[in-house]
Every structure is written in structure tokens, then in C-alpha cells.
Amino acid sequence: MLYFRLPLLSLGLWTLPALAAAHDTLLPYVFEPLPLGSIKPEGWLYDTMRSMGDGLAGHQFDFYVYVRNSTWIGGDKEYSELAESAPYWFNYIVPLAYGLDDARLKLQVKQFVEYVIAHQGGDGWIGPHVPYGSRDLWPRFPFMLGLTVRIPSSQGMRATIAEKIHLATPRGRSELRQDSGSCDA
């Protein structure tokens, strides 16, 4: 068996002025990232996204037990011990909600984020609480990706979200050092 460690990503936080100021060796962006929802889909893309939002994909929060009752939001349902169904849902629902400017989907995103960050562990662990030694980092990556994409559109929550990510990052590094977050290839 081959084990390797995955470095934690910086999670896009380099756009925060405080972090950039702390690292004077960082070069400025050549291009600035576009804010979430600043590009509006039209034509075929809009029709496809609207079908997703109005169809099965846009209603998983309403009926799919592994999202609606996920351990990420206080439920007890997961299809595997990775607890990854809700993070994958979250990662795609964020750009869909903001691309369509859909109030129903945005509310789902808001409720999910608020619950998860309100229940972050005192040690920085984010997501379902599991015993030490059995924590898996994998589902945190799609969640963090969706979260960092949402930061620019989070008017009243930017600082809170950034703080929660900063709390989670050292915990993840610690898990990797203990090999509990290693990947088996």
C-alpha cells in the first residue's frame, strides 16, 4: 500500500487583505476573480441551469434523505462513513443558486452554512463530529470549495466564514500529521 499526504489548500483566502498583508512575498493577481453571480447564464446554459434548479438537483434538500438529514446539519443519515453527500450537494448548489439568482436555493445555502459554521468544534473541526483517529478530511474539501466560492456574496458573513475556515485549517493539518487524513492509493 502506498500512502501519501495531501497538503491543505489555501482555500482561496489569499483574496482577504489581512492574509495578503501578512505575506509580503505574495504577488498580486493579474486578474481579479469575478464575484459569484456576476455572470448571468443565458440561452442554452440558462435553460439547463433552470431545469436543474427546478428539477431533481434543485430539490435534493427537500427530499433526499442524505442531504436533508445529513450529519452535517444535525441529522443521522449518511450513505457512507465519509459523510460526503451533503458537501457534494453544497458544492454544486452554491453556483447554481447564485447563477440563477434563485431565492429558494440561496436560502438552502444560507441555512446549510449557518448550521455548519455554528456547530464547528472547539478544536476547529468542521462538519460531523467523529472520534479522533477516524476523522476523514475528504468531505471537507467539497464543502470548503463551496464555502470559499460563496465568501464574496456573503455580505454579513464574510468575516465569520473566513474565521471558521482559518479555525478548520490547522485542525486539518493536525489530522494529516496523525495520518488519519491520509489517502490510500
Image (cartoon, rainbow, N blue to C red):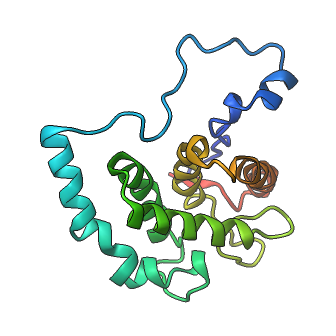
Where residue 39 sits: x, y (%)?
36, 33
* Residue 67 placement: quadrant: bottom left
Return the residue found at the far left. Answer: 44
- The residue located at (70%, 52%) in the rendering is 161
- The residue located at (22%, 55%) in the rendering is 50
- The residue located at (79%, 58%) in the rendering is 178
Left/right placement of residue 44 relative to residue 121 reads: left
- The residue located at (55%, 64%) in the rendering is 110
Left/right placement of residue 100 relative to residue 37 reads: left
Return the residue found at the far bottom. Answer: 76
Q: Is residue 49 visible?
A: yes
* Residue 12 placement: quadrant: top right
Residue 177 to residue 40: above or below: below
Left/right placement of residue 103 relative to residue 178 reads: left
* Residue 54 placement: quadrant: bottom left
Q: Is residue 1 visible?
A: no
Where residue 70 sits: x, y (%)?
51, 80
Residue 142 to residue 6: above or below: below
Q: 185 or 64, which lies in front?
A: 64
Left/right placement of residue 164 relative to residue 33 reads: right
Where residue 82 sits: x, y (%)?
53, 70
